[in-house]
Amino acid sequence: MKNIRNPLVLVAGLLIIVISLAVVYRHFSSRETGPDTETEPQSVSQNDTDQPTVSDPIPSTIYAGTDELTVSEVMTGLDIPWDIAFTPDGVMLVNERAGKLTARLADGAFQAVEADFSDLSVRGELGLMGMVVDPRFVANRRFYTCQGDGGTGQIKVVAWRISDDYTRADRVDDPLVGGIPSASIHNGCRLRFGAEGYLWISTGDAARGASPQDLNSLGGKVLRVDAATGRAAPGNPFSGSENAELVYTFGHRNPQGLAWHSGTGRMWAVEHGPDVDDEINLLIRGGNYGWDPASASSSYYQQVPMTDAVKYPDAIEASWLSGDPTLAVSGAIFLTGERWGGKEGWLAVATLKDSRLYLFQFDEAGNLEDSFTVPELDNTYGRLRTPMVGPDGALYISTSNGGGNDLVLRVAPSL
Ligand SMILES: [Ca+2]
């Protein structure tokens, strides 16, 4: 036995050393794929629910496999770029929270887009936020923004038409959808198109305890509307008031991510928890997602579960929970395209406080199967806001550190 055992121990020891060296090499070589921005997330004043501190991730493994990622900077010098949208002709639109819009043309040149943001309300987490291009953009040149409205003190969705040369955008429906509660925190505001071309809008509770469970309030909801009119999309579950007719799901806290899975035709939402339990939710028509920060003693009481199954036995449980602490999850998108290989169909989620990109695999019923973080982006670029798949199949990701040092990164498997 001794003769056999010793060589086994020796081989095992050698294997451990080789694997360790490979891991160290991978770690440092991946860091070299993009320059360190020297950004300290802790120095950022923008909060998005939580103070930005680096925390341990949920139990997960790194992006293992043979498909290494290449990271490059495609835009620099931005200030809180909130959303990214691609037009069918390959133009990338990027907005900035303080009220700015830039087009990166198909040839790589940058074009400032003149647009009137004079009534924009910018405070705390509020400003120019979600943005999405109309599915019929070729015919109508329309795109949409979700933004703080200085006129009403609320949030509104505005429809715009952009000029053929991308130099100018004009409002064509203002508001397309208005009356969404706003505050300096918890404003939701992600816009994405889903099945049948309807526009989905995530809204935060705006620190108002009664909103998420009140179908007559547009706060703490995911709305589903006809983008041509701003009215309720056919098939929405509720009636009784104009607001209720817009609601698809309710009982949300601050969903900043919406991701449409084209294969199943289902929309997913990603939302910030309070001090624990960020959530990823598969949206079910008419579902209550269980957030209810109302109490007799306080107008906004957050010491309640993100999904209160005791109070609401029919509440829909999350497909994924961060546990303690939160990561401050923001934008999300399903990876599409063959270049992602075995990761095609996984959900990419950007995190602010945790400053990493997570990849989640869910089954069709919404059960979590696996998750990874991407080592190339682990605390390398600071807070990450929005991932978006470009026409080249690469993932484009905006950072959210402030101070005019933000980036749009391009992340692609090295082929
Ligand atoms: Ca919930």
Image (cartoon, rainbow, N blue to C red):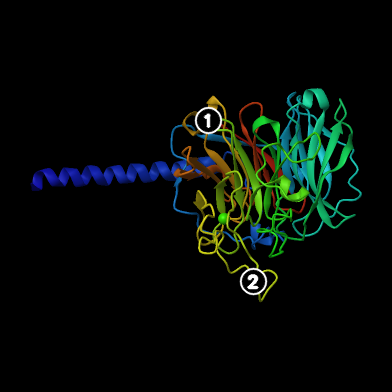
Q: Is residue 192 visible?
A: yes
Tell me the number on the disc at residue 149.
none
CA gap, disc 1 and disc 2: 46 Å
Question: From what the image shows, is residue 113 above or below residue 316?
Answer: above
Disc 2, SS: loop
Direction bottom: furthest residue: 297
Q: Is residue 378 visible?
A: no
Q: Nearer the viewer, mark 1 or mark 2?
A: 2
Work out whether residue 78 or residue 13 is closer to the camera in this orientation and state it. 78
Residue 9's spot in the image, x, y percent?
Answer: 20, 47
Q: Is residue 49 left or right of residue 325?
A: right
Q: Is residue 20 left or right of residue 305?
A: left
Residue type at tag 2: Ser
Residue 50 found in image quarter: bottom right
Work out whether residue 135 or residue 384 is closer to the camera in this orientation and state it. 135
Residue 84's spot in the image, x, y percent?
Answer: 72, 38
| Residue of label 1 | 340
Question: From what the image shows, is residue 52 above or below residue 358?
Answer: below
Residue type at tag 1: Trp
Residue visible at 17% across and 43% down?
A: 7
Residue 234's spot in the image, x, y percent?
Answer: 70, 36
| Residue of label 2 | 295
- Cβ atoms under marks 1 and 2 closer than 8 Å: no
Residue visible at 72% across and 46% down?
A: 245
